[in-house]
Amino acid sequence: MLEKKDCCESVSKFIQDIKQKKISGSYNIAISTVELLKKLIIQTEWKTAEELLKIIQDESKHLHQNLPLYPTVESMVGRILKIIREEYINGREDRPDADAGVIQSLQRLMLAESPAEDYKSIVPELQEAILEHITELETELENSMFDFSADNIVQQACEHIHSNEIILTIGKSSLVEAFLKAAAAERKFEVIVAECAPFCLGHEMAVRLARSKIETTVIADSSVFALMSRVNKVIIGTHTIMANGGLRAVCGSHSVALAAKHFSVPVYVLAPMYKLITTYLCSYDQDAFNCFVSPEGVLHYSDGAILSKVHVYNPVFDYVPPELVTLFISNNGGHAPSYVYRLNSELYRLDDK
Amino acid sequence: MEKQDIVNYFSNILEKEKDVSAGMAAIRTLLEVLKHDKSETVQELDSNLRAAGDAMRNTDYPTTAVVSGCELFSRFVTLTNLDTASFGECKTIMLQRGEFFLKKLGLSRGKIAKLANNFIVDGSRILTHSKSRVVLQAMQEAANANKRFEVFVTTSSPDSSGVEMYHELEKASIPCTLILDSAIGYVMEQVDMVMVGAEGVVESGGIINKVGSFTMAVCAKEMKKPFYVLTESFKFVRTFPLNQRDIRNDFKYPASKLLSDLSKEHPLVDYTPPAYITLLFTDLGILTPSAVSDELIKLYL
């Protein structure tokens, strides 16, 4: 059995690996989060679901404090907490009612016969059931992420991109790239890439698209508005979907979305379900929301003389409010931003924090 | 219970206990009616409960929450397995469920306050309208958590309920300012968010609340400030107003005025369409306006 200390150690190691980018990319992070939690489930000592939930919730708090900007970690922990609850209820001999306590609703409030489940009874073979369910989750992850061409999101490309359209995107997203390439296999269209300064990852994106024979134009971020009038669709990736349907996306996305709104151009956001989190943006000066990196790209170190006279910031993210997003394209279809709350309540238990 | 007893019991609760809202009082009254009920069949019981609801609606208290509360209560007590031997047993079950329902509802205000707490951050300035017990509790809890924030309260004519709210906030030593109803536009640029309660939440996800809420919502939208509604889920009511005229007259005017010329009366509530609401904080969680219709459909379909 794993002592409290060892268990902390493996969690700390996980946090460190992510911070030092030894584990990178959403898919790898998702898989290793699941691995870590599996280890916790197997190796720590617990008797009832309540104890197990407590262990994982504690670790989840720890993870969240240290890795506030990794939605995938938060999402996977949420999924697994829900799995534990579901398996507990399925395993109960008397089975109160099928999904009691899993989803809260007005109907639940009305129909509930008994007080809320306390997860205290001992369920035989709970661990096996949970692990089996987690394996299903892993298969789901593998299917959607291992190979982009097999991804459900990419398969929807032809439904959304039509011949001779002009698509605008910003920065680099491997999912958007795969999506555009999939559509290009069947149709001819044009792509405009905003370079997304100061990182300018848009350049790389444009090169890759051009290599697959897609007609590509790179523009400066400042010309987004000027070109928007001729664009048919904006297709972007995102870092996170917030609980209200807003986005935490690469800096510059907000101005693209606003320009699109001005010209009534639809904004499609490609986002697999593991980017969905249950937090809201409570205030614009929330510390955990954004992250600031080296301002090297904004002002060169060689401009040393001015450095002491000015403030230089280089934020990574933008918040895009839900009313600027037309549609989310996820691995289980298209969803309007107003529907995100529903996905949230299906995937996670909302008071699991 | 006679009609007069019902009304007395109902108004007694509201007068004596300032902390209880009309909807809660209605549910408690119905439970009392159920206790003293002498009916022999479910149908008779149902019509008795309905009559009790009608009697309470004919008082001069705000009726929106009474209507929703009564409807939910009768749903709740009857939505269960009633295949028992005698009607007496059946009634005991209903009574137990009623008590359970009431207990559950009692907890909701605390839950909402906890949810809203995250949104009140240090240095925020909040505008609120009229008096709402949920908003008050949320603010008290935020103040207890040592958050520093400032509140603006409208006086809210005609009954000046905002003045009451102002005194309550002062008691909790929360810095607050009383403003005129007509100064909503003036203070809007200074505030970070609007937080109001609701008398009823309708099927579209919009709210029915003290007159002036709509003005505030339009103004907030124009100035791009978030408009938050704090409300218990028993205030979800099955009506779908299309505009202000479309709200039921008994929601808008006190019962004693219903027979007079209504075109000369001041309405007491207005309807705020869902497009103006950012989020609703309820005991079911934080909901977008479209989630409300979902909840209502699930229950009443």
Image: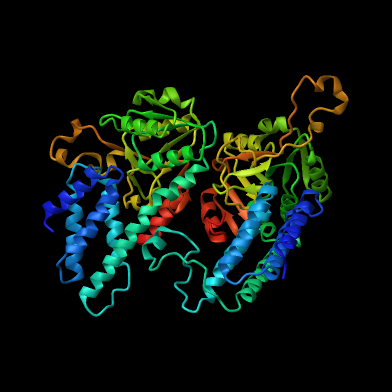
Q: Nearer the viewer, residue A336 or B216?
A: B216
Q: How many marks?
A: 0
Q: Residue at x 82, y 53 (%)?
A: A22
Instruction: Answer with the quarter of the image where residue A30 lies.
Output: bottom right
The C terminus of chain B appears in which quarter of the rendering? bottom left
Would you say A249 lies left or right of B209 here? right
Q: Nearer the viewer, residue B219 or A256?
A: B219
In this rendering, the answer to whether A162 lies above or below B194 is below
The percent coordinates of residue A235 (x first, y second) are 66, 46
Q: Residue at x 69, y 67 (%)?
A: A38
Would you say B99 lies left or right of B189 here? left
- What's the coloring here? rainbow
Q: Is residue A324 visible?
A: yes
Instruction: Answer with the quarter of the image where residue B93 lies.
Output: bottom left
Q: Residue at x 59, y 47 (%)?
A: A242
In this rendering, the answer to whether A158 lies above or below A252 is below
Q: Residue furthest right?
A: A302
Q: Is residue A331 visible?
A: no
The percent coordinates of residue B193 (x first, y second) are 48, 34
The percent coordinates of residue B266 (x first, y second) are 23, 32
Q: Nearer the viewer, residue B246 or A295?
A: A295
The N terminus of chain B appears in which quarter of the rendering? bottom left
The percent coordinates of residue A152 (x first, y second) are 67, 61
Would you say B290 lies left or right of A234 here? left
